[in-house]
Image (cartoon, helix red, strand yellow):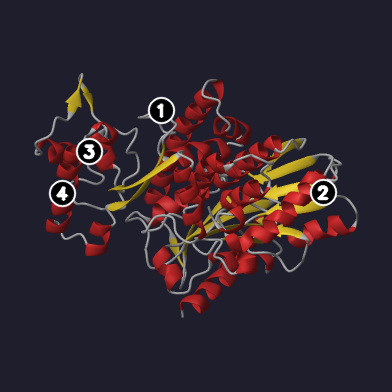
Amino acid sequence: MSVAGSPVPELAADAAACAERLREADRVLLASHIDADGITSAAVATSALARAGIDHEVVFEKQLDEASVAGIAARDYDTVLFTDFGSGQLDVIAAHEAAGDFTPVIADHHQPADAETEFHLNPLLVGLDGSSELSGAGASYVLARALEPDGGDNRDLAALAVVGAVGDMQDGDDGLTGANEGIVAEAVEAGVLETRTDLALYGRQTRPLPKLLEYSTDAGIPGVSNDEAGAISFLSGLDLQLKQGGDWRRWVDLDDEERRTLVSALMQRAVSSGVPADRVNDLIGTSYTLVGEERGTELRDVSEFSTLLNATARYERGDVGLAVCLGDRDDALAEARRLLRNHRRNLSEGLQWVKTEGVTHEDHLQWFDAGTRIRETIVGIVAGMAVGSPAVDSSKPIVAFAEKNDEELKVSARGSHRLVRQGLDLSTVMRKASRSVGGDGGGHDVAAGATIPTGERRGFLTAADELVGEQLG
């Protein structure tokens, strides 16, 4: 057990203060961001509040702005718990606090705005990196541990915090690091999570072996990645039983010896094909398995679980994702799977559109405007997928636009961890460039977003390009 019973000792005091305020409340409104990290944040927090006997209601918001915070205030709760957002909108929230509308309690990991509030749990306030060391769900989990009633144990909720961290792209080349490691350790101690060194390809639980390799676009293995016939031919050359009962086996169906055979052959193919050494090494990584979930389902693997939640969030069905997180394996899971199928189809079509239409290059960034062709809730994911494809220049961040409504454009920016190491901070770029044209934005160094007035695209791009140029020198 960590110091003072907290998985992140640096946040123990802030968590205790936030927990005490929540216990004093007659009832609490829990408002959370609507993405994989936000949904798991809400699931962790609502479970902890329920176990502590605290009356509460859950609502989701795509973003916090003056209108949405005013709507939250109008619900007439004396205490509002914000999870996976709130820090970046602290100036707006603090104004409502000063007016006596509600007392805010914030468990977030985004860059705080220039304002203060008493009950604020954020890794950035104690010198931890909110982009890579602790997610919104992680912050909610630290709070959940502080909310434990006498004799209670909320460590089982650590599994959802790990899902949130992976959904927030915090599992880099070395898996989850920093403050996240304490949460992973508690999940393992609680018997809800298993970690192992494994093949670092998405779809280990659910994808048939040929699809697992065909879709391994990040690895970029010639004759295998993005090549259905090539993937089948590669597998057929191995001494493996590839089918069972007429169906292709999956990675999860292989025993340890079969897995070693496949990994060895895959790495040999990569090396002989001239794949750079760092990309070859990236074929192996840390996997996180939810041991209580059914083997061979998307809920068993943390990466696939987070994708399922994203599919509910991007179509404004956070209630469905929340129900799945809370254990509904019937109607909610069936609806989540339907949304996931639709989500994958839309992503595929969106990426194909970008490849066909191409991108426009500025001096320091590249961009595309999808208009209404790509849904504004998924345009950032499409941009991220494009970063890993030959369609874009990997030496520049990409900015994507989509129509939000008649008056506003949604802006999503994606970079790479390599560019971040060189100085890129898209959170700063999005915030400053959007505010320069009457919008607002923020996020993380590697992925961020904004909303701007419809007619301000060129002004925004000019400001963003200049900021990226300054950061990358």
Q: Residues within 10 Å of mark 3 (few under 14, many from 20)?
A: some
Closer mark to the observer between disc 2 and disc 4: 4
Mark 2 secondary-structure assignment: helix
Relative image position of residue 395 (x, y in whole percent): 38, 68
Q: Earlier in the sequence, mark 3 or mark 2?
A: 2
Contact (CB < 8 A) between labels 1 and 2? no
Q: Earlier in the sequence, mark 2 or mark 4?
A: 2
Mark 2 lies on residue: 70
Q: Amino acid at mark 2?
A: Ala
The residues tagged by marks 3 and 2 sit, at their Cα atoms, a distance apart of 51 Å
| Direction from residue 444 to residue 23 in the image, left or right | right
Q: Earlier in the sequence, mark 1 or mark 4?
A: 4
Instruction: Kindly identify which numbered label has been placed on residue 228.
Output: 3
Comparing 267 with 258, the one in front is 258
The residues tagged by marks 2 and 4 sit, at their Cα atoms, a distance apart of 57 Å
Relative image position of residue 315 (x, y in whole percent): 58, 36
Q: Residues within 10 Å of mark 1 (few under 14, many from 20)?
A: few
